[in-house]
Amino acid sequence: MHVQPQSWQKIELSLVPDALAGHDSPWILAARKTAFKRFSEHGFPTKREEDWKYTDVSLISKRGSLAPDNIPPDAPSEAKLLAWALSGEGMHLMVFVNGHFDSELSTIDDLPDGVQLSSLADMLDGDANLPESLFSQQHEHTIFAALNNAFVTDGAVLKIAPDTVLETPIYLLLIASGHGLAIYPRIIVMAGKNSSATVIEHYMGTLDAHNFTNVITQINVGVGAKIEHCKLIQEGPAALHIAGVHAEQSKDSSFTSRSFVFSGRLVRNDITSSLSETGCLCTFDGLYLLDDKQHVDHHTRIDHIAPCSTSREYYRGILDGESRGVFNGKVIVHHGANQTDAHQTNHHLLLSKQAEIDTKPQLEIFADDVKCTHGATVGQISDEGLFYLRSRGLDADTARSVLIYGFANDIINRINTPYLRKRIEHLLLDRLPQGDMVKELL
Amino acid sequence: MLSIKNLHVCIDGKEILRGINLDVKAGEVHAIMGPNASGKSTLAQLLAGREIYKVTAGSVHYLGRDLLAMSPERRACEGVFLAFQYPVEIPGVSNALFLKTALNAIRKYHRLPELDAMDFLKLVRERMNRVGMDEALLLRAVNEGFSGGEKKRNEILQLNILQPKLAILDETDSGLDIDALKLVADGVNDMRGPDRAIILVTHYQRLLDYIVPDAVHVLSQGCILKSGGADLAKDLERHGYNWLETGDLIKQIA
């Protein structure tokens, strides 16, 4: 069967660009048009494509229009409340509602010297001063990136000057609210030499939001810079979320990606880093807790291009109900990337008979003198562990929850931002039976 | 306190315990000895509520109530404690969280207020000191990467914190060097009292040099072959289990 719907083909890009950011810039218009053409020609990926073998995106094509909504809506009260709570944490907060920057809810006034954080739409409408290549085919890792290039509405652009250390995280809160929306944000981070920062991308959907979010995050990690990118997906139960997080690392830089998925109907994250100079450290962490018919797919790819770099990857998934997880971890050690040290593990815990995980480590090594290891496990709650805890007085539910918490803790413990660590811990425990009791004891 | 009558137990259709009778009163320490595969650990785990074993006949009463009808957690809350022969590793869960969760579960069952963090820490530190455990082990995941001795001490620490009425120690002495053995024995002797019964499951007489039992039972092929006083253990040490398993000799002693 050909999964090509008619709806998107009917969309004419010409209906959209007048309203989208940057419509006065010829290069942006041209970039949008050619990107849309690429997408139209390719269409939605089908399961016949190796990278989409386990993930059926026909849910996206079956929904309504793909065109973004260009009218910034009022923020829902949940968003206001969360923004208020977050601003109390003292973080640099930038709020987006349905893909549009909401300056009223944001608190980005007291950024330190050397840090520039702006709305992408403002930049595209003004004197953009952004590399055109950011919107070119060269940076499209999947066909969905072309769609984002065509329709991107707004987003965050973070520029950090050399030697600038940003102590407080940049917190990007992206709210989805309302029906049938297509949301196209873009996050761009340019970290100068020896700079350092943590960026948190938090996707939050209201319960009734039936959105399709297509987001691309591009991160340029300068020489000796240290960037940590954390992404938390808490989309609404019917939401579809397709994303790319793509880093390019310069000499002696460190990049960490942490991906957390707690809700959303269909989630796909393509996370990549290109280690094109020596001495890089790249760390990919992931944790997801799935239930019902949720489908969450992580495709990661680390390219060791230059010698003497290190990569670490730790993914864990907990699957209940009829949920399905996909993990594909590709590590490519290119010719000449000697003394590469790459290690990857992924562990999955299946809580129900109907849950399913497809996991595939994919190591492609074209250099000698490298150290590459990987390991994957799929398991269930251990009977011995359960009995041990019950024999100490914990009821069966609490014992299970403690074991699941322990399983996830390996990833949670590695989160450096205390606020985020606590939030993830609570998101997990809130979903587990008797989780409140465990929470009290932490 | 504990009354076992004609207990038969199977696993996967194979009979492991074949008619055990045992009475343990409050204040007593009983040692259950016997060769490998005699059913000692099965008995210990069954008493704690391990569900993989099937009782085909007999009964177990604890404080006058049907122990076999209780869930493992109910037994724990009612005061039954098993020190595991192979303490289980619980990755990602700190020893501190584990101990706190266990203690508060039992306190909650008895409608006692939960201990706050300060009181809990004070209690745990004091008890850790007594069993000679490094405080750093509080922050490590339960039993993960612990040495054999550390795992056993961790069991004794739990015993001391949870203060059960009936403590069953399943080969807690195995794999311990002499100093660790003494510490573990001290930890157990600490717990002796008129309201508490202790069952020591062991291969060797060695532990009984430090914890002198009121009664010794020899288990072989799922039956108690012989019961006696502390001296029985010494005879076993001298003659080995074969001494009892040979019918003629048993008659001679009788």
Image: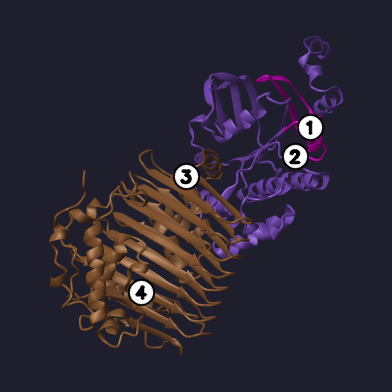
Chain colours: A brown, B purple
| Separation of residues labelled 3 and 1 (CA atoms) | 35 Å
Q: Is residue B28 above or below residue A241?
A: above
Q: Earlier in the sequence, mark 4 or mark 3?
A: 4
Q: Which residue was labeled with disc 3?
A: A395
Position of residue A163 measured from the top left corner of the image (x, y, whole percent): 53, 85
Which residue matches tag 2?
B173
Where does label 4 land, which residue? Answer: A134
The alpha-carbon separation of the residues under discs 1 and 2 comes to: 8 Å
Amino acid tagged 2:
Asp
Residue A382 image position (x, y, % from top left): 51, 41
Q: Nearer the viewer, residue A96 or A41?
A: A41
> Amino acid under label 3?
Asp
The chain that hosts pointer 4 is: A
Query: Callout 3: few (<14), some (14-19), or many (20+) C-alpha neighbours within 10 Å?
Result: many
* Identity of the residue drawn at 23% across and 79% down: A21
Q: Of helix, strand and loop, which one carries label 4?
A: helix
Could you tell me the amino acid type at mark 1?
Tyr
Q: In the displayed structure, does residue A51 sit left or right of residue A392?
A: left
The reply to the same-chain question for discs 3 and 2 is: no
Give the distance between the C-alpha atoms of the residues marked 4 and 3, in whole angstroms. Answer: 54 Å
Which residue is found at the position 39% from the left and 49% from the top? A326
